[in-house]
């Protein structure tokens, strides 16, 4: 099974979740602003995460979502660490749906910096999808 993990993280909270998921899947988590973030081979599952900054997603994540196309992934699973609302989840889901990528209703969310227990929860959550 081909798993891809992509994220954008300014201060490391979302990155920590991405890395916990990637470790569970035996792959590398890749920041969306890196050259190798492009989906080279269609993924069975794309895990993708981000957070809100001043009520919106970071422009790099928004731009990345626009590059995705149907066929890049059979399905996507979203995660976030946004403080106040889960609006980031909806914004990422909307971007994926606009790209034609089916999105799981279920998502992984923690508020801010994840604890060790929450990182384990993230890994367990991810394993449901592969
Ligand atoms: C400049 C800035 C603006 C933020 N704006 C929001 C916001 O509008 N809504 C919200 O829920 N959280 C907001 N947050 C909280 C972040 O979404 C939260 O800290 C998140 O875990 C950051 O993820 P990261 O460490 O992966 O960058 C903001 C944080 C910063 C630093």
Image (spheres, helix red, strand yellow):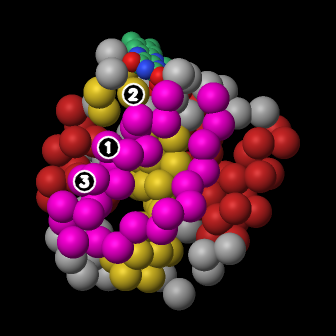
Looking at the image, which residue is at 22% across and 42% down?
Answer: 62
Q: For residue 116: magenta?
A: no
Per the rendering, the mark at residue 52 is: 2
Measured from the top left, where is residue 74 in percent x and y?
37, 81
| Mark earlier in primary sequence (2, 1) | 2
Q: Please, what secondary structure does the residue beneath circle 2 have?
A: strand
Q: Nearer the viewer, residue 97 or 69?
A: 97
Label 2 residue near ligand 1, CB within 8 Å: yes
User: What range is drawn magenta here?
Assistant: 85-111
Q: Give neighbour class at mark 2: few <14, some 14-19, many 20+ (Cα, 10 Å).
A: many
Q: For residue 109: magenta?
A: yes
Evaluate whether residue 13 shows in this view.
yes
Q: Name the residue under label 1.
A: 91
Measured from the top left, where is residue 33 in percent x and y?
28, 43
- Nearest to the eye among marks 2 and 1: give it: 1
Q: How far apart are marks 3 and 1 (CA)?
A: 6 Å
Measured from the top left, where is residue 17 in percent x and y?
61, 45
Per the rendering, the mark at residue 95 is: 3
Q: Nearer the viewer, residue 68 or 96?
A: 96
- Answer with left or right where residue 71 lies relative to residue 22: left
Looking at the image, which residue is at 35% across and 54% down?
Answer: 93
| Mark 2 and mark 1 residues within 8 Å of each other at the beta carbon | yes
- Answer with left or right where residue 7 lies relative to residue 64: right
Is 121 rendered above or below residue 53? below
């Amino acid at each position: 099974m081909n798993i891809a993990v992509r994220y954008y993280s300014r201060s490391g909270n979302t990155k920590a979740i991405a890395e916990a998921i990637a470790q569970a899947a035996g792959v590398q988590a890749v920041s969306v602003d890196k050259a190798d973030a492009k989906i080279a081979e269609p993924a069975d599952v794309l895990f993708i995460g981000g957070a809100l900054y001043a009520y919106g997603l970071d422009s790099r994540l928004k731009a990345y979502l626009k590059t995705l196309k149907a066929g890049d992934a059979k399905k996507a699973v979203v995660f976030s660490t946004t403080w106040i609302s889960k609006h980031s989840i909806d914004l990422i889901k909307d971007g994926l749906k606009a790209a034609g990528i089916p999105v799981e209703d279920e998502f992984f969310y923690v508020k801010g910096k994840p604890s060790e227990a929450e990182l384990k929860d993230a890994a367990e959550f991810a394993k449901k999808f592969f």
